[in-house]
Amino acid sequence: MDGSTEMTATTQAPAASGDQRPNRREARRNEDMALAARAERWMATGLSTEPADRAGAEAGVRIAYALAGLPAPQRMLWLGSPAAGATAVAMLRTGLADDPEVREALAAQGVRPGDLQLGRSVRPQVRTRPWAQARAALAEQRGAVGFARHWAATARRPWQQLVDQLATPLRTRLTEQFRTGSGEFAQAQQDALLDVVYGQHDAAWLGAFDSHPDVDGLARVAGSAGWWWAFEHVAILTERPRAVHRDNLGRLHHGDGPALSYPDGFGLHAWSGMPMPAEIAAELPTLTVERIRRESNAEMRRVMLEHFGFDRYLRESGAVETQSDTFGKLWRVELPGDEPLVMVEVVNATAEPDGSFRTYFLRVPPDTQTARQGVAWSFGLTSREYRPEQQT
């Protein structure tokens, strides 16, 4: 939490009943503005790339344990990324020193796998229960409609941006990465993701309960560190990312390196929100039509196509012109194991400053039969409804 005091707008009861409605509207507007500002503050927390405030985070952990009625953990360990944090949990649970870099990071803090007992996970007491208590208290205070409105104002956008478009893709990629291993250790890495507390990404919902005492410890950790784990004897905390690259929709997106990168070198590559292996990301600058055709994973092929350029792929892959009319040309190319790529080539009716007319390619559904149908679809209309002379 940033420690700032949030003022709640109040109005004095008017002398005449006819004045109450405008004053209520003004109070509602003031409250909406305050809640929107709160949501933006927590969004900034969730997207922070500042180095972790380790002292602040550890203080938050102690408060979170105390609020849960638990003694403070005996040790607090720091790792450089969520991947390293989950791996450290697996190493301490199994006693297997499987990862040299994580082993070295633990050794620097005086810990060797097998020498330190985590104890049971206390995530239900430290994270799940405070969230439920804060939610129940706010719902009782505001009622069902008031709670829904409050949640929409404080958490809907942060949840989409931080959970749906950051935490979930990161967790998905880690799960896939850990599944490439085998045996007890790989399973322990996957199990560690079941116990994680999202830290700064819990900013997605903490704004809704900004001043509730039950989530004070969680809020302090979220304002100071990345993902973390709460066990009976040990808390494992991780650094925040050092860089976050997103597109204009807030999705993880970067064509030149990881979209999400951490101080220990771990990174998540992504294109338009789609996580991808580092080896595929490295190929993007040198893609060819043949390489795209060879890709067996349909999702990765679509990432490649978007990076390569649909219009370029049409030109270089031998696409077939299936139809043309006054609205444009319809092109089609088959994709192995996937729906065909169908696009309408249209010429902008407005001239460029040099007098030329720019050509655009619009991707349309694979069952599109005519250029007119494809252009109409881009406006959300049927061919019969589409009358360009009425378009503005």
Image (spheres, grey):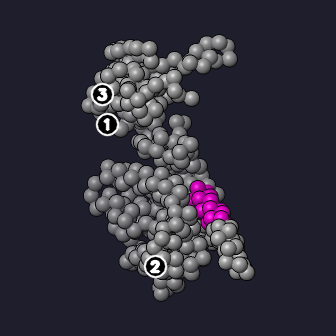
Callout 1: few (<14), some (14-19), or many (20+) C-alpha neighbours within 10 Å? few
Q: What percent of the width, then of the height, locates residue 307?
A: 47, 31
Secondary structure under tag 1 reads loop
Q: Residue drawn at (42%, 62%), measured in percent from left and top?
A: 86
> From the viewer's perspective, is residue 251 above or below residue 148?
above
Of circles 2 and 1, which is in front? 2
Q: What percent of the width, then of the height, locates residue 60?
A: 58, 75
Q: Give the mark, 3 or 1, whose residue is nearer the N terminus.
A: 1
Task: Name the quadrant containing residue 50.
Answer: bottom right
Q: Is residue 294 visible?
A: no
Secondary structure under tag 2 reads helix
Which residue position is annotated with label 3? 367
Secondary structure under tag 3 reads loop
Q: Are marks 2 and 1 in contact (CB under 8 Å)?
A: no
Which residue position is annotated with label 1? 297
Q: Residue drawn at (45%, 36%), measured in percent from left and top?
A: 281
Callout 3: few (<14), some (14-19), or many (20+) C-alpha neighbours within 10 Å? few
Q: Main secondary structure of the magenta part?
A: helix
Of circles 3 and 1, which is in front? 3
Rounded to the nearest whole Å, what is the CA distance between mark 2 and mark 3?
49 Å
- Front residue (pair 345, 219): 345
Q: Give the mark, 2 or 1, whose residue is nearer the N terminus.
A: 2
- On whether residue 33 falls in the magenta region, the answer is yes
Of circles 2 and 3, which is in front? 3
Which residue position is annotated with label 2? 136
- Front residue (pair 36, 20): 20
Q: Amino acid at mark 2?
A: Ala
Q: Amino acid at mark 3?
A: Asp
Start-end of magenta stretch = 29-48
- On whether residue 44 falls in the magenta region, the answer is yes
